[in-house]
Amino acid sequence: MAVAKNLKTRDHATANVIIDFKKLEVVKCTMGGVAVPKDFDRIVEYYMEHYESTITRLFNENGYDVEYRKKDAETQPPEANPS
């Protein structure tokens, strides 16, 4: 993963995923040479799981507040009370 303020022509040619955090949009998304739907929320959610601090920083640097809860915390049932 690389982060750049300004994209170059070679970035468009070599990158599989390009996300614009100023406009909150996916510029490019291919996986294995196949175009994938440019669903911003879904793609950012995927990258949040692996690069949370970087993604949070990118949102903050572009003037957005982000609150992220991992899916595991949302989907796990509450613990049983042993008493």
Image (tube, grey):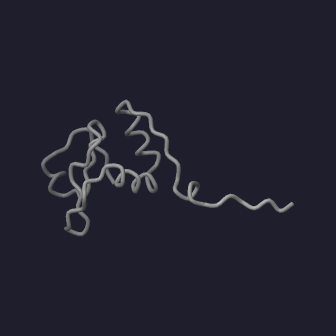
Q: Quadrant of residue 31?
A: bottom left
Task: Provide residue 54's location: percent of width, then percent of height.
Answer: 42, 45
| Residue 2 higher or lower than 33, as above or below | above
| Residue 46 higher or lower than 31, as above or below | above
Residue at 19% across / 43% down in the picture?
7
Task: Provide residue 69's location: percent of width, then percent of height.
Answer: 53, 48
Q: Nearer the viewer, residue 24 or 58?
A: 24
Q: Nearer the viewer, residue 59 or 6?
A: 59
Q: Quadrant of residue 13?
A: bottom left
Q: Determine the residue located farthest toward the left in the rendered image.
A: 9
Task: Provide residue 82's location: percent of width, then percent of height.
Answer: 83, 62
Left or right: 10 with respect to 80?
left
Quadrant for the N terminus, please. Answer: bottom left
Task: Provide residue 79's location: percent of width, then percent of height.
Answer: 72, 60
Left or right: 82 with respect to 54?
right
Q: Quadrant of residue 25?
A: top left
Quadrant for the C terminus, please. Answer: bottom right
Residue at 22% across / 56% down in the picture?
15
Q: How many marks?
A: 0
